[in-house]
Amino acid sequence: MLTMQANGQVRKPTPCGPVPTENQLRWQDMEMYAFIHYSLNTYTDQEWGFGNEDPKLFNPSHLDCKQWASVCKQAGMKGIIFTAKHHCGFCMWPSKYTEYSVKNSPWKDGKGDVVRELADACRAEGLKFAVYLSPWDRNHPEYGRPEYVTYFRNQLRELLTQYGDIFEVWFDGANGGDGWYGGANETRKIDRTTYYQWPETYKMIRELQPNCLIWNDGSDRGDLRWVGTEAGNVGETNWSLLNHDGEVTWPMLHYGLETGDSWVPGETNTSIRPGWFYHDTENEHVKSLSKLMDTYYKSVGRNSTLLLNFPIAPNGRIHPTDSLRGIAFNKMIHEVFKTDLAKKAKINTQGNTTIINFKKPTAINRFVVEENIRYGQRVKKFALEALVDGQWQPLKDELVENGDGLTTIGHRRIICFPTIKATQLRFTVLESRCEPMITRTSVYLAPELTADIPDSGEKRSSGLHYYFSNPKEMMIDWDTEQTITSFRYLPPKNTREGLVTHYTLWASTDWANWTKLAQGEFSNIVNNPIWQTIKFAPTKARVLRLDADRLAEGDRMTFGDIDVINQ
């Protein structure tokens, strides 16, 4: 927003409190990027290695960083942060400062460099690249002593000078404890506020990578903060502010600090699985589509970014279940936000109130609002109301447990509410630190994922996963590519509502290229609602899409059961 002075010159708005740097603005616009956890832990079935694991365990059969980058891009990620060194101290690049690295593994006869391969793969896919370097090292004999800090900085220098542009450096908050420590097998504790001498380390980072952001949750404030949980959510109130000095409490991490003197926005990190590293026992516990969407609304939709982890399996690839779920997640985000219903409405703004007038009663369930954070975060509280059947009714965020949660906005705020048919929507800023600078008010109708799907977000029928990308489009996927010959549909019992009478069936192996398998009518299905079979030539597929071209009644597809027949 620009204003005119009396002399006709354009005047920039006055900043309101702390404001983001250009680096922080670019980072916030990324919105979603991936974590990749991969190390010796992958082969020992651990989350934290002790530091004495044998480097010879690292010998993946099909390590493919191009696959990682391709999956992450298709999942909507704008970059990748890679665990170059986790707490066990094993380096995924051939560091010249230690023997505990891939150079002493059987993989590629010790000539490999995972960091290099991933950095190159990211740039080939147009993704940004970043590194995670654990300050804690359970392998190094000098950890806890001054000599280790020099070692740590030397390794950081390698990562910042040998792999091109780095958009973020991620320093884990786990510091000190028991470890192998070169054979000492003891517990070492450090003063995390002074031991690493962060100011000097930060200075080096900014000199070597001036566009890089620093993630650190300690008393030495970085550019970004942890949000106090790995569950995938930040507070419904979320200020991008903290104080530059002093320790932070959990509420400060989770909600920010309205009176903070520095711009330190929150980054929401979580894994697509229960753990950060791959475990076979978690193959059936990959987050459902509904859970991923809930995470999106509670991170990107609450003035944060989303750092979503994809663990690498022992063969050196992202597991098919994880990749398919991630790609479906991105597809659903695009499905939800593809049509801004406000663009076809008449919008009036007077003072701090904006009214969106629809041409007719319109079904809606999502509201998006954004501030121009370049000049600071301003809004403290707002109201959202809908005119339904001639009566104004307040709308609350259904994802907030207590209260309506209509507080801060920041880069983006998404309000989710039950579907209603409204003729008008009224947005009003109630409290603000300075004059509000609202840059977007958008309205959407999201598919109702929970209508036919249990709380887990998906149903397993005949070993299949399914979800609805819109009310008349069903996606069915499974873990591995198979050759299939027919698809079966059982209509719902005792109802014509949502029963499919005419269909088109599509198949894909990569979610990008689709082959039409069949198109037609389920003859007499209304009068005789039994299993219907669609047969086709043997086809390789990993996912099917069933389009309901016509329904007996209603506007949303339903079914009793589904099945896919393999060759």
Image: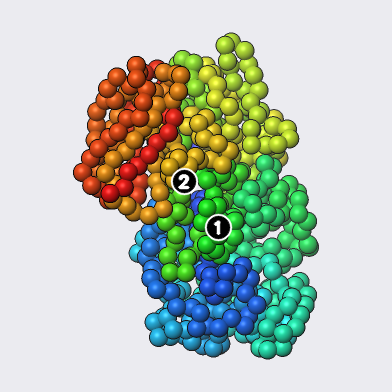
The spot of residue 68 in percent (x, y) is: 42, 62
Q: Name the residue under label 2.
A: 329
What residue type is disc 2 on? Phe
Label 2: few (<14), some (14–19) or many (≥20) C-alpha neighbours in 10 Å: many
Work out whether residue 532 or residue 390 is closer to the camera in this orientation and state it: 532
Residue at 54 percent of width and 49 percent of height: 287
- Residue type at numbered disc 1: Glu
- Residue at x-position 49% and y-position 22%: 363
The numbered mark, 1 or 2, whose residue comes first in the sequence reads 1
Q: Residue furthest left?
A: 537
Residue 427 in percent (x, y) is at 60, 27
Distance between the alpha carbons at the discs numbered 1 and 2: 19 Å
Mark nearest the camera among 1 and 2 is 1
The residue located at (47%, 69%) in the rendering is: 314
Q: Is residue 221 left or right of residue 360?
A: right
Q: Where is residue 211 in the image (x, y as percent from the top left)?
A: 52, 65
